[in-house]
Amino acid sequence: MNIILASTSTLFGGAYLEYLKEELIKLYEGVDEIIFIPFARPGGISHDEYTAKARSFFETIHIKIRGLHEFENKSEALDQAKGYFTGGGNTFLLVKTLHEEGLMQALKQNVEVGKPYLGCSAGSNIGGQNMKTTNDMPIVYPPSFDCMGLVPFNLNPHYLDPNPELKHNGETRETRILEFLTQNDLKVVGLREGNWIRRKGDAITVEGSELTRIFEKGKEPYEIESGSELY
Amino acid sequence: MNIILASTSTLFGGAYLEYLKEELIKLYEGVDEIIFIPFARPGGISHDEYTAKARSFFETIHIKIRGLHEFENKSEALDQAKGYFTGGGNTFLLVKTLHEEGLMQALKQNVEVGKPYLGCSAGSNIGGQNMKTTNDMPIVYPPSFDCMGLVPFNLNPHYLDPNPELKHNGETRETRILEFLTQNDLKVVGLREGNWIRRKGDAITVEGSELTRIFEKGKEPYEIESGSELY
């Protein structure tokens, strides 16, 4: 496999995908056109608008973009594509659309044979085993929470440390992930903004500017450095 | 109906249910025993532990507590009870358990004939039309997101205003609720900590120390004062 699962598309104060530019040139080496999967629709923007946003970045690295929504036969379009990018937004909407149109499995099969895949945020969640560690609001009901399982764990994108100054009794991110572990025995990678998971063949590492927080059942959460292998 | 749907059980720096004490004495007037529904299991604590926590508060207002998990026939237990309290925690876990055991409908029917009901956080979410505006992580997959619909809208408990100082690109609460409205045409009541919804007969008001933020499809979000009626 040849994939990047990034915490976020955009760093605070940065431009869309800018911080990943050098990585994306390597990821998509030899590929001049990819399919963009716009179904997560951040803020409810249209598939066309979202695809245009992705296109404006990928033009700068000379890669053409087609939106998956443009194709009559989407499964065939996935089979014929040379690479993929799934943008962020609402994971429930993304997973519902992919399952209902029978595309989760088709995408998985194509990525597993080595075609390059980039996910950001919701697009990274679907690279995990399931979407049970998303931060998103359940605005629609998907037929299943199962995802592609491109890595043998789950991700929590936009991982956020507790704010000790907040006078608020909603759960912290860590509390939520520990609740997940009371119901599921599956590693969760808390991916801070600025970090991404890189899988190349069988080697899976975490990359980027921040430490990464790992949650496992029956263990205290712990931090690993950029470049560490993940299993 | 005679219900309270509260944003939170506990205010920052306060004790469990303390800020609601006078309201709860009125809600449960003439009732000396209620059933506690512990299925949301905050932090994964056991049903027994959670019930003991509720009991320690309700002792101070002379109301006995039985945990719903203690009954062999839970549906019958709901029918025979004089009142209810559903505690907070994980809404997915709560809704999954209630649906799988056939209890959502049984609880609804009993509350609709006028038996007093208190919900906090997840326990308030299930008073809404559905759980699609919960803040919780989808740690388990419920067979449906539908809830009791004790009020003709949805709630967002622990409603939190955006923090302008946060250098983070995760969605704000407002962004998430506006995404919900792109997919659903249903009013959402953003209930800040310190506030609760009171329904007595057909009159529904919002009460408490804070303004309440209302979200409706096709309108700018707006604020209403404590004591305002909700439709």
Image (tube, coloured by chain):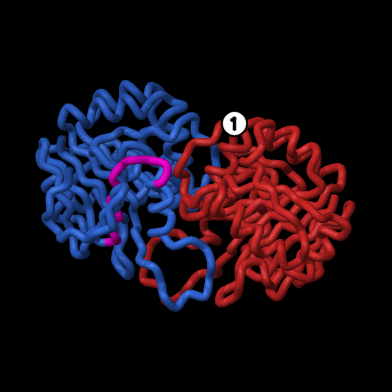
Chain colours: A blue, B red
Question: Label 1 is found on which chain of the structure?
Answer: B
Which quarter of the image is occupied by the C terminus of chain A? top left
Left or right of B199? Residue A25 is left
The verdict on residue A191 being magenta is yes
Report x, y in % for residue B136.
51, 52
Helix, strand or loop for disc 1:
helix
The residue sitting at 15% across, 59% down in the picture is: A226
Q: Badge 1 is on which residue?
A: B100
Give the residue drawn at x 16%, y 42%.
A199
Q: Nearer the viewer, residue B105 or A42?
A: B105
Q: How many marks?
A: 1
Q: Which residues are magenta?
A: A182-193
Query: Callout 1, which amino acid?
Result: Glu
A204 or B76: nearer the viewer: B76
Instruction: Give the image location of residue A216, x and y in percent.
Output: 29, 49
Q: Is residue B215 visible?
A: no
